[in-house]
Image: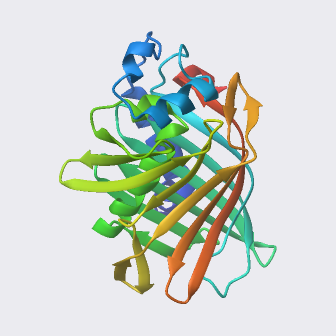
């Protein structure tokens, strides 16, 4: 019975998240270099302007970056109410990975926790209710594609990712850039929009699958809006982020959260503290 309890505990989303975080950090490549002017000259002009505006030119490269969220909430479907939750997220440059953990209380008292992982072309969404009931356990290609789209969209929160060979850039007009992320046999693209100040304000992609019914997916237009820029940790970063599906029956905004800062180059010692 004790062994069964340990097995179940190990497979809780929170424990899985911490174990995977440790494994990815142990494999991370800590670089002692900086983002230099010559590193960005090949990039679209709008993206170069953003990197200067946000303060990343001259900043250290980062292989492990924690995105600090607060006031996050999610809608599980258009007809559901917003659900507040706590969110913890790390993005990994050389591993081409994104790892997130969320927990909440349904109806004010039923614990829910979920772990979302994308790693080098594979994805996994795993959630449990009341530590016992598996709500979702999805390792499909569609989940991987969705994770890749989000990692691409967030590549400008940690621009060391945007400089990697697995992402290629094309010039749009003066305030747009187009990028493609390739991991193994997976490929997704998206469009990045900037304002005249250099702020990254919107991301759009047509490559993210939407689950129209259980196990059945169709790609739908998807966007992320970023605004309320603020100074944090020596950078200018968006203070608020919304994620929206653009469906035939109308727009469905399912994510709303605030970013308070970035912890770049998070090593094992700083995480342990």
Between 261 and 132, the one nearer to me in the picture: 261
* In the rendered image, the vertical position of residue 61 relative to residue 4, given as above or below: above
Please provide percent x and percent y for residue 70: 75, 49
Residue 140 makes an appearance in the image: no
Q: Nearer the viewer, residue 110 or 210?
A: 210
Q: Quadrant of residue 161?
A: top left
Residue 83 falls in which quadrant of the image?
Answer: bottom right
Percent of width and height locating residue 237: 67, 36
The residue shown at (25%, 47%) is 183
The residue most toward the front is: 174
Q: Left or right: where does residue 65 sit relative to residue 237? A: left
Which residue occupies 78% across, 79% down? 107
- Can you see residue 110? yes
What's the image's color scheme? rainbow
Identity of the residue furthest to the right in this view: 108
Residue 97: x %, y % from top left: 40, 43
At horizontal 60% and vertical 36% (from top left) the residue drawn is: 198
* Foreground residue among 80 and 228: 228
Q: Residue furthest top?
A: 32
Q: Quadrant of the C terminus?
A: top right
Q: Is residue 224 above or below residue 165?
A: below
Image height of 265 relative to 138, above or below: above
Asked whether, in this view, residue 21 is left or right of residue 232, the answer is left
């Amino acid at each position: 019975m004790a062994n069964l309890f340990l097995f179940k505990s190990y497979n809780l989303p929170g424990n899985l998240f911490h174990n995977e975080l440790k494994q990815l950090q142990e494999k991370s490549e800590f670089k002692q270099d900086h983002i230099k002017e010559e590193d960005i000259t090949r990039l679209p002009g709008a993206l170069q302007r953003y990197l200067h505006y946000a303060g990343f030119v001259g900043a250290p490269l980062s292989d492990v970056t924690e995105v600090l969220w607060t006031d996050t909430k999610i809608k599980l479907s258009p007809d559901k109410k917003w659900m507040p939750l706590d969110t913890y997220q790390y993005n990994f440059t050389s591993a081409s990975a994104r790892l997130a953990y969320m927990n909440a209380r349904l109806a004010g008292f039923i614990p829910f926790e979920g772990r979302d992982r994308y790693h080098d072309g594979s994805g996994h969404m795993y959630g449990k209710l009341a530590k016992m009931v598996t709500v979702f356990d999805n390792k499909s290609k569609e989940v991987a594609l969705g994770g890749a789209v989000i990692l691409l969209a967030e590549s400008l929160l940690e621009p060391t990712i945007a400089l990697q060979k697995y992402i290629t850039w094309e010039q749009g007009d003066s305030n747009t850039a187009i990028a493609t992320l390739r991991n193994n046999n997976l490929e997704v693209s998206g469009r990045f929009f900037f304002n005249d100040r250099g702020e990254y304000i919107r991301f759009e992609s047509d490559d993210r699958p939407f689950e129209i019914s259980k196990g059945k997916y169709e790609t739908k237009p998807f966007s992320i809006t970023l605004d309320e820029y603020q100074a944090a940790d020596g950078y200018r970063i968006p203070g608020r982020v919304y994620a929206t599906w653009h469906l035939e029956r109308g727009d469905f905004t399912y994510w709303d959260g605030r970013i308070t800062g970035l912890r770049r180059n998070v090593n094992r010692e700083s995480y342990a503290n």
